Image: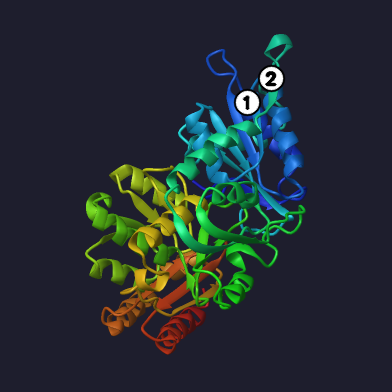
């Protein structure tokens, strides 16, 4: 089922253009409805964007008008909302954030009582209500009107949870890029608990500098600092701190695939890798999958999206999974990706094994990847073309097990994404160009 407003990670878009206060109000009205004649309890957090308070007030007004209780924990990370919803038995959690997007975008991400992404059925019901000409939901009156509680104190539980996890880490020199985002509210307080030298960059948010040439989507600044040789590890968070990329002491990027490789081997050694497998997406690098298999670890693939990774992990009881982008899920700790948990897990591995990132990545080789997006008239017709599928199979056979090809349609546009990974960039380009030329000549 295709949604009008909700994507794979909530509702996101430019504020007052796509994501309006009225839309936020309607969302609040729907999820704020009383359940079994009891007020619903809803936890709300936000990142550092200037538009966060605007959307917070829209959501809160709708919730209160329906009789719900709003607990505002102010600026925080997305995974903290997931954690606190479960710990304190909230009915819903809402995070106001557009993650790695620029400041003028924002988003509304909703968690259920289990700290997981909202069910598709509820999303569909909310969308129906948003588009309704009349407001058909009942209002709360008199004593049933909702209440608003400023509950920033709840963050102490989340910080304590993280601090306990990292309490034994010592001796490392760490540089953390906080992306002028959510991590600025948590990371300094967390890392002061570690017996390590920790310095921060991009930790002065002003409402419009979130993700602005910093954080996990803009690594150049962190890479430059790491090449100076003063630190053992560089940590790069995104705007809402649910994902992490790492830079080693020589300035090399350690992405989500490499992080999973490090932790999968560590978990396997410690008997914590459930079913001896990790969950990756179809976009994870061929080199990562090959290295994992050579280490005796099975790989389970799902479609792109951390919610699909989490669903597969929960369904089959896997303990570790994630995406190349740095969304890593440790299911024994949390139901969603958490950049701070990921950082602690990697730091603990470095500390207890006494190894550098380079030493932990022995056996891991990233294959060169080439990706091209091609506009078409009818993506379905292209993908079902027998000649194209025969060409893909032929090219895959030519790689002889040393690479892979992925041709897939965009989920939102008339685009075909053609990707190849091979031992050399030249080989990958040759494969992609050949397939792109074939699709172009189809003229579909």
Is residue 301 among the parts visible in the rendering?
no
Are the two marked residues, 1 and 2, in contact with CB atoms closer than 8 angstroms?
yes
Quadrant hosting residue 363: bottom left
The disc at residue 416 is none
Q: Is 378 placed above or below 107 here?
A: below
369 or 179: nearer the eye? 179
Which residue is pictured at 47% across the width and 50% down the height? Answer: 341
Report helix, strand or loop for mark 2: loop
Q: Relative to 286, is 76 on the left or the right?
A: right
The disc at residue 32 is 1
Q: Position of residue 273 (x, y in %)?
A: 27, 52
330 or 318: nearer the eye? 330
- Residue most extreme to the top: 143
Instruction: Report the residue marked by disc 2.
Output: 146
Q: Position of residue 337 (x, y in %)?
A: 47, 50
Q: Of tags 1 and 2, which is closer to the observer?
A: 2
For label 2, count other residues whose C-alpha is less than 10 Å away and answer few (under 14), some (14-19) or many (20+).
many
316 or 434: nearer the eye? 316
Which residue is pictured at 54% across the width and 73% down the height? Answer: 373
Which residue is pictured at 29% across the width and 44% down the height? Answer: 317
Q: Is 231 placed above or below 34 here?
A: below
Q: Is 141 placed above or below 95 here?
A: above
Give how far apart the Cα atoms at labels 1 and 2 are: 9 Å
Report helix, strand or loop for mark 1: loop
Q: Relative to 389, is 412 on the left or the right?
A: right
194 or 37: nearer the eye? 194
| Total numbered badges shown on the rendered structure | 2
Quadrant hosting residue 419: bottom left
Which residue is pictured at 71% across the width and 46% down the height? Answer: 19
């Amino acid at each position: 089922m295709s949604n009008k407003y909700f994507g794979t990670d909530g509702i996101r878009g430019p504020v007052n253009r796509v994501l309006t206060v009225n839309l936020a109000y309607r969302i609040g009205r729907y999820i704020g409805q009383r359940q079994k004649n009891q007020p619903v309890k809803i936890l709300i957090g936000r990142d550092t964007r200037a538009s966060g308070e605007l959307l917070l007030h829209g959501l809160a007004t709708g919730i209160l008008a329906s009789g719900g209780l709003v607990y505002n924990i102010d600026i925080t990370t997305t995974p903290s909302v997931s954690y606190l919803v479960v710990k304190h038995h909230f009915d819903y959690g809402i995070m106001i954030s557009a993650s790695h997007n620029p400041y003028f975008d924002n988003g509304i991400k909703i968690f259920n009582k289990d700290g997981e992404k909202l069910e598709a059925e509820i999303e569909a019901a909310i969308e129906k209500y948003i588009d309704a000409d009349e407001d058909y939901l009942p209002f709360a009156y008199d004593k049933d009107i909702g209440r608003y509680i400023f509950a920033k104190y709840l963050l102490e539980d989340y910080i304590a949870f993280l601090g306990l996890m990292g309490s034994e880490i010592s001796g490392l020199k760490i540089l953390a890029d906080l992306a002028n985002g959510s991590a600025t509210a948590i990371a300094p307080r967390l890392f002061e608990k570690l017996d390590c030298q920790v310095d921060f960059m991009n930790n002065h948010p002003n409402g419009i500098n979130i993700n602005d040439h910093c954080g996990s989507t803009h690594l150049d600044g962190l890479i430059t600092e790491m090449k100076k040789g003063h630190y053992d590890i560089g940590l790069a968070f995104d705007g809402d701190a649910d994902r992490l990329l790492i830079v080693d002491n020589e300035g090399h990027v350690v992405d989500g695939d490499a992080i999973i490789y490090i932790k999968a081997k560590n978990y396997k050694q410690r008997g914590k890798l459930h079913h001896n497998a990790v969950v990756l997406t179809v976009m994870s690098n061929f080199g990562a999958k090959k290295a994992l298999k050579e280490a005796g670890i099975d790989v389970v693939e799902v479609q792109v999206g951390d919610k699909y990774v989490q669903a597969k992990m929960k369904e089959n009881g896997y303990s570790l999974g994630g995406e190349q982008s740095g969304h890593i899920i440790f299911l024994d700790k949390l139901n969603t990706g958490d950049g701070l948990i990921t950082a602690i897990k990697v730091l603990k591995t470095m500390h207890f094994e006494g190894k550098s990132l380079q030493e932990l990545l022995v056996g891991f080789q990233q294959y060169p990847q080439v990706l091209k997006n091609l506009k078409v008239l009818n993506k379905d017709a292209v993908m079902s073309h027998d000649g194209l599928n025969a060409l893909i199979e032929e090219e895959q056979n030519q790689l002889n097990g040393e690479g892979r090809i992925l041709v897939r349609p965009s989920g939102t546009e008339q685009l075909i994404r053609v990707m190849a990974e091979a031992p050399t960039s030249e080989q990958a380009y040759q494969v992609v160009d050949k397939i792109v030329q074939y699709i172009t000549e189809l003229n579909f």
